[in-house]
C-alpha cells in the first residue's frame, strides 16, 4: 500500500461542497452527541463511572501479558481454540487456515474494525472465500467498496437515496425508494438466505474477560448472534487491548458504551460467548498489529483504553464537517488521528492537524483518554521526524522567527491590518491564502491589543515613584 500522505484537506473539501450530505452528517452526529449528554445527566454517578473505567483500563494495560495468559488458560478450559496474531498478515493466514480446514467457502461476519485493519476481505477473496457483512451499515459500505466512515455507524455519511441506488444495483430493488424501513427489509431479505447457508461465521468482540475466558459482543441488529450461532464454526477476531480483568468490571463498561455511542441506555443485544455451541467449534484470534509497540509509547499508550464508542467523533467539529472517508483510514475522527500514525507515521501525518484542539473529544471520552493533548503531541513528533510538508514546515519556521521578535511581530500585525482595510479582494483572496478559500478573512480592527494595553494599562502597571522626603 502507498505511503503517500493522506490529503485530508482536499478530501474534506469535496465533502464540504456537497451541501445536503454535509448538513445531514453534521446534524445526525450532533443529535447523537446531544442524546449522549441527556443520558449523562440522568446518571449522577456518570463521572465516577468514567473515572472507574479509566482506572480499570489503565490497570489492565499495565498488566496486559498476565491477563492475556489468564484469558487464554480459561478460554481453553471452556473449549475455545485461542490463536495469536502479531500483525494483519498473520491474522489473515490464521483465519484462512481455519476456514480451509473446514472447507468453508462462505463466511458471514458482523462488524469488526480489526478485520478492517488487517484488510481481511480482499485476502480471503483471493483464497476463494466469499465474505458477507451482516451489519446493515457495513454491508452498505461493502457493496459500495468503501471503508467504514464511523466506528459505530459505518454508513452515517450516506443519505437514503444513496443506499437506494446501491441496493438497486446489487439487489435489483427500486432505485427511487426513500423509506428506510423498506431498504432495511431489502437487506434482511437478501441476507437471510446467505446466513442460513453459510459455512462459517465471524464476529469481533467488544470486551474480553480474563477471569472467565469469555468475550462480549454488543450489537443493535442481532446480526452478530446469527453470525455466531447459525453456522457451526465461529471465529472471533479481537484486539489484545479489549481485556478487562473480571466479570464484575463489565457493569461499568456496559453502562458507558451505548450511552456514549448512541445516547441509548444499552445495546439491544449484549451477548456473552462462553464457548462453542454443542457440536460446534469456536476460535478466538487475539491480534496485536502494533498494539504492543503502542503500549511502549510514553505519550500515546493510553489510546489503547478506547472502547470504540465513537463519542469523540460525534462531538468533533472537524469530523462532523469533513466526513469519515476524508481521513483515508480505517479509524477516522479524533481517535483515528491519534491511532492511525502508530500504524504508519508518514501516511497519516496530516491527520493530527485535522483538529481545532478544542478538547471536546477528551471531555466526552468515557475512559478519559486525553485525546486533544495527544493530537498536539503527535504534531510535535511529526515535526521532529520531518513528516511535515516542506511548504508548511517553512511557513511555520518563518512564523516562529516572526513571533520570536516582538517589534517585528507588532509591525507585521499593523501592516496586515492596513492591507485588510485597503487592498482589493482579488489580491487578498488567491491560492496563497488557503484560509480565504472557504472563509472570510478577519475584519480589520481599529486598535490592536498591544496599542490598547499601552494606552490603558502600561502606565498603571509601572511601580509608583517613591515620594520625596523633606529635608
Image (cartoon, rainbow, N blue to C red):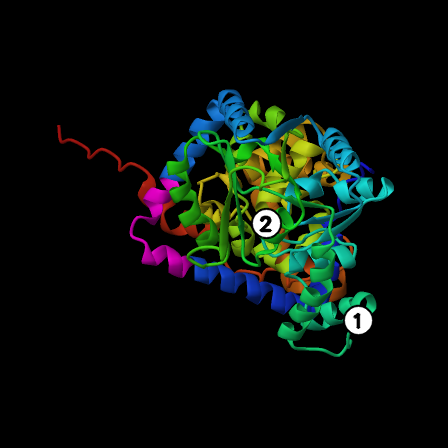
- Closer-to-camera residue (270/163): 270
Q: Nearer the viewer, residue 261 or 255?
A: 255
Q: Residue 168 carries which label?
A: 1
Residue range in magenta is 37-51
Element under disc 2: helix
The quarter of the rendered structure image containing the N terminus is top right
Q: Could you tell me which residue is drawn at 67 percent across and 65 percent down?
A: 188
* Residue 218 x/y as whole percent: 52, 49
The secondary structure making up most of the magenta span is helix
**Residue at 54% over, 50% down:** 310
Q: Residue 470 carries which label?
A: none
Query: In this rendering, is residue 425 above or below 412?
Result: below
Instruction: Compute the Cα span from label 1 to label 2.
Output: 57 Å
Horizontal side of 454 relative to 430 (left or right) equals left
Label 1's element?
A: helix
Instruction: State the quadrant of the C terminus.
Output: top left
Point out residue 21 in the picture as x, y percentages from the top left corner. Answer: 67, 67
In the picture, measured across the screen, residue 354 lies left or right of residue 6, that is left
* Marked residue nearer the N-terminal end (1 or 2): 1
**Residue 421 quadrant:** bottom right
Q: Can residue 234 be seen in this view?
A: yes
Image location of residue 430, percent across then percent down: 77, 59
Q: Mark 2 points at which residue?
A: 413
Amino acid at each position: 500500500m502507498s505511503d503517500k500522505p493522506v490529503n485530508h484537506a482536499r478530501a474534506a473539501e469535496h465533502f464540504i461542497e456537497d451541501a445536503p450530505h454535509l448538513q445531514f452528517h453534521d446534524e445526525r452526529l450532533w443529535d447523537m452527541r446531544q442524546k449522549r449528554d441527556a443520558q449523562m445527566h440522568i446518571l449522577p454517578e456518570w463521572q465516577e463511572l468514567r473515572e472507574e473505567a479509566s482506572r480499570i483500563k489503565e490497570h489492565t494495560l499495565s498488566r496486559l501479558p498476565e491477563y492475556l495468559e489468564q484469558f487464554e488458560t480459561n478460554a481453553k478450559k471452556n473449549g475455545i481454540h485461542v490463536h495469536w496474531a502479531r500483525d494483519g498478515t498473520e491474522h489473515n493466514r490464521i483465519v484462512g487456515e481455519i476456514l480451509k480446514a473446514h472447507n468453508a467457502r462462505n463466511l458471514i461476519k458482523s462488524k469488526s474494525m480489526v478485520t478492517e485493519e488487517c484488510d481481511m476481505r480482499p485476502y480471503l477473496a483471493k483464497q476463494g472465500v466469499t465474505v458477507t457483512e451482516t451489519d446493515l451499515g457495513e454491508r452498505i459500505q461493502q457493496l459500495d467498496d468503501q471503508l467504514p466512515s464511523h466506528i459505530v455507524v459505518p454508513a452515517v455519511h450516506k443519505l437514503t437515496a444513496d443506499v437506494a441506488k446501491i441496493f438497486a444495483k446489487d439487489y435489483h430493488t427500486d432505485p427511487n425508494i426513500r423509506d428506510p424501513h423498506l431498504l432495511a427489509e431489502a437487506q434482511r431479505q437478501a441476507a437471510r438466505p446467505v446466513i442460513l447457508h453459510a459455512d462459517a461465521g465471524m464476529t469481533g468482540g467488544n470486551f474480553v474477560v480474563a477471569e472467565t475466558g469469555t468475550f462480549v459482543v454488543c450489537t443493535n441488529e442481532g446480526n452478530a448472534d446469527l453470525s455466531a450461532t447459525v453456522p457451526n464454526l465461529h471465529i472471533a477476531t479481537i484486539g489484545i487491548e479489549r481485556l478487562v480483568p473480571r466479570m464484575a468490571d463489565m457493569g461499568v463498561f456496559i453502562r458507558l458504551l451505548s450511552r456514549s455511542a448512541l445516547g441509548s441506555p444499552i445495546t439491544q443485544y449484549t451477548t456473552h460467548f462462553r464457548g462453542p455451541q454443542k457440536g460446534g467449534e469456536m476460535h478466538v484470534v487475539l491480534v496485536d498489529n502494533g498494539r504492543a509497540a503502542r503500549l511502549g509509547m510514553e505519550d500515546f499508550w493510553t489510546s489503547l483504553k478506547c472502547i470504540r464508542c465513537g463519542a469523540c467523533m460525534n462531538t468533533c467539529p472537524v469530523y462532523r464537517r469533513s466526513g469519515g472517508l476524508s481521513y483515508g483510514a480505517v479509524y477516522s475522527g479524533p481517535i483515528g488521528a491519534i491511532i492511525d500514525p502508530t500504524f504508519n507515521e508518514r501516511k497519516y501525518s496530516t491527520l493530527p492537524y485535522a483538529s481545532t484542539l478544542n478538547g471536546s473529544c477528551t471531555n466526552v471520552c468515557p475512559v478519559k483518554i486525553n485525546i486533544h493533548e495527544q493530537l498536539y503531541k503527535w504534531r510535535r513528533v511529526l515535526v521532529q521526524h520531518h513528516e511535515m510538508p516542506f511548504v508548511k514546515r517553512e511557513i511555520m519556521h518563518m512564523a516562529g522567527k516572526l513571533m520570536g521578535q516582538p517589534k517585528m511581530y507588532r509591525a507585521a500585525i499593523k501592516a496586515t491590518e492596513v492591507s485588510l482595510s485597503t487592498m482589493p479582494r482579488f489580491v487578498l483572496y488567491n491560492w496563497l491564502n488557503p484560509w480565504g478559500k472557504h472563509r472570510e478573512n478577519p475584519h480589520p480592527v481599529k486598535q490592536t491589543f498591544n496599542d490598547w494595553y499601552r494606552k490603558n494599562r502600561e502606565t498603571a502597571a509601572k511601580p509608583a515613584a517613591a515620594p520625596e522626603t523633606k529635608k
